[in-house]
Image (cartoon, helix red, strand yellow):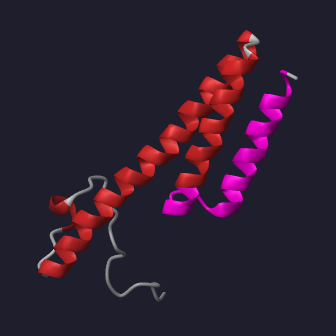
């Protein structure tokens, strides 16, 4: 019976960073560093969006309309920034803004 691979399939490394991939080419090493930096920045932006969603939910739950408006404006701004930087796809950003508007409208 023939196997699909004549060599072992590529391994997935659990760790991230330079040590996990062992790049020999300087440009590839730079690319690994850059990818890690971009990954952390994207993660920070998406995390901020989740945090502001929780803050909006809290404001609406407390019945504070003024605070909810402020949180909603900030949340939409954070979503737009995440979309602009590429951390979120624009359709995902639109969906999150619509969800935020629905949450905000519960208070009205």
Q: Relative to residue 108, is residue 40 depicted above or below?
A: below
Q: Assess whether residue 101 is covered by the magenta stretch.
A: yes
The magenta region covers 82-107
Q: Residue at x 25, y 68 (%)?
A: 32
Q: Relative to residue 79, is residue 57 depicted above or below?
A: above
Q: Residue at x 68, y 56 (%)?
A: 92
| Residue 31 spot, x, y in % from top left | 25, 73
Main SS of residues in magenta = helix
| Residue 88 spot, x, y in % from top left | 57, 57
Say which of 4 and 50 sits in front: 50
Q: Residue at x 22, y 64 (%)?
A: 33
Q: Quadrant of residue 61?
A: top right
Q: Is residue 31 left or right of residue 83?
A: left
Q: Assess whether residue 93 is covered by the magenta stretch.
A: yes
Say which of 12 and 72 sits in front: 72
Quadrant, the C terminus: top right
């Amino acid at each position: 019976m023939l196997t699909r691979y004549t060599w072992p399939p590529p391994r997935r490394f659990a760790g991230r960073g330079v040590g996990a991939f062992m790049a020999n080419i300087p440009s590839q090493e730079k690319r690994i560093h850059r990818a890690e930096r971009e990954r952390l920045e994207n993660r920070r932006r998406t995390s901020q969006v989740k945090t502001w969603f929780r803050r909006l939910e809290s404001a609406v739950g407390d019945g504070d309309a003024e605070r909810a408006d402020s949180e909603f404006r900030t949340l939409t701004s954070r979503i737009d920034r995440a979309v602009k930087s590429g951390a979120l796809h624009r359709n995902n950003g639109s969906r999150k803004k619509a969800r935020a508007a629905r949450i905000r409208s519960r208070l009205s």
